[in-house]
Amino acid sequence: MKAAFIESTGDPAVIQFGELPEPELNGHDVLIRVHAVAVNPIDTYIRSGVISFDSPKPYIIGCDAAGVVEQVGNRVTGVSVGDRVWCTNQGLLGRQGTFAERIAVDAAWCYPLPDNVSYDDAAASSLVGVTAHLGLFREADLQAGETILVIGGTGGVGSMVVQIARIAGARVITTAGSDEKCHIARMLGADVVINYKQESIQEAVRREVPKGVNVFWETRRQPDFDAAVEMLAPRGRMVIMAGREARPEFPVGPFYVKECSLHGFAMFKATHTELRAAAEDLNRWMAANKLTANISKTLSLDEAAESHRLQEASTLGGDGQLSGKIVLRV
């Protein structure tokens, strides 16, 4: 089968595209004929060696996939040959990745795909959708009627946070860096969009929510805690899910006097049960057209190296070319 894989870490040029043996199935696995995969920043960190797992060699890159079940292990129940499915949390913690024509996935990490949802949309929504769900509900306990500030509302995770927060009945304020991205953020459902290149985020938030926001979702690699705490309401919650090397100063006094809380998490550490609960909500919202993938670029699997170059340029270089997810069709 064709696959995109690496034999050693490095820059995107280490990604190879070629033939690998078909995956072997164990009793708990399903064999998926992949139709679409998506790129995430964590994929580039693993490929570069910034994040190190004890991974198989050769290692197939990628966390997300959507496709059709071709075979099921003898211990699998509830999944049948011919089912449309999607999965995430692959390529992590020693698991093989998804950028291949066929993948073997433990059925515990595999979810049904509604008939009216495309493979592209499912792949693009998977890891980022689960991340948004965990952060909003398990961590921040977002409630209807609250106000949330989402930094970067058109990015992979940010676009999911905007939509899911709106579904939950929150008022959504977000940021974007161009008129085009501001338009996309409004289309995704944001109530207020701040063009951070034209006005101060703090001043705009102060104008829109004088008492502060209940939830602050930070997507940048270098958080500004002084600004964040100033913008939080009493008992506000701040969610962070980026910036592994960041060591910013922290305003301890204002933070605890406001009785705020800080929530950091990594979606790949969530349990099977937590991810399945998130997946069930995502499926319901996708099927009802309440949640849509923000896809910025579509490539083919043999362009995996290019997809990593584009993702790194956006995540680390901040070149602004991407306003959403990269999907590769298989």
Image (cartoon, rainbow, N blue to C red):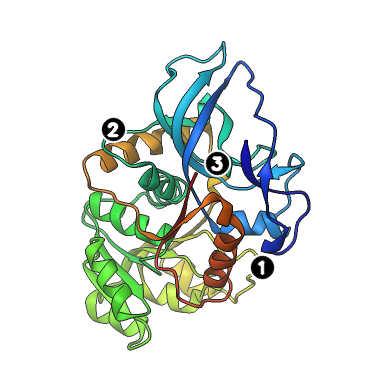
Q: Is residue 154 above or below residue 7?
A: below
Task: Inspect the image, locate mark 3, and give the three-letter code of the amino acid beneath it.
Answer: Asn
Q: Is residue 283 visible?
A: yes
Between marks 2 and 1, how big is the CA–CA gap? 41 Å
In front of the other: 67 or 268: 67
CB atoms at circles 2 and 1 under 8 Å apart? no
Q: Is residue 50 visible?
A: no
Q: Which image quadrant: the N terminus?
A: top right
Say left or right for 97 vs 128. Answer: right
The residue located at (44%, 51%) in the rendering is 128
Q: Given this view, does label 3 or label 2 mark the residue nearer the observer?
A: 2
Circle 2 packing at 10 Å, graded few (<14), some (14-19), many (20+), is: few
- Mark 3 / mark 1, whichever is N-terminal: 3
> What residue is disc 2 on?
115
Task: Inspect the image, locate mark 1, and give the three-letter code of the amino acid beneath it.
Answer: Glu
Between marks 3 and 1, how big is the CA–CA gap? 22 Å
Image location of residue 228, percent across then percent down: 43, 73
Asked which secondary structure carries label 1, the reply is: loop
> What residue is disc 3 on?
89
The residue located at (28%, 51%) in the rendering is 143
Circle 1 packing at 10 Å, graded few (<14), some (14-19), many (20+), is: few
Q: Given this view, does label 2 or label 1 mark the residue nearer the observer?
A: 2
Between marks 3 and 2, how big is the CA–CA gap? 22 Å
Task: Inspect the image, locate mark 2, and give the three-letter code of the amino acid beneath it.
Answer: Asp
The image quadrant that residue 322 belongs to is bottom left
- Mark 3 / mark 2, whichever is N-terminal: 3
Q: Is residue 57 above or below residue 106?
A: below
> What residue is disc 1 on?
245
Asked which secondary structure carries label 3, the reply is: loop
- Mark 2 / mark 1, whichever is N-terminal: 2
Q: Given this view, does label 3 or label 1 mark the residue nearer the observer?
A: 3
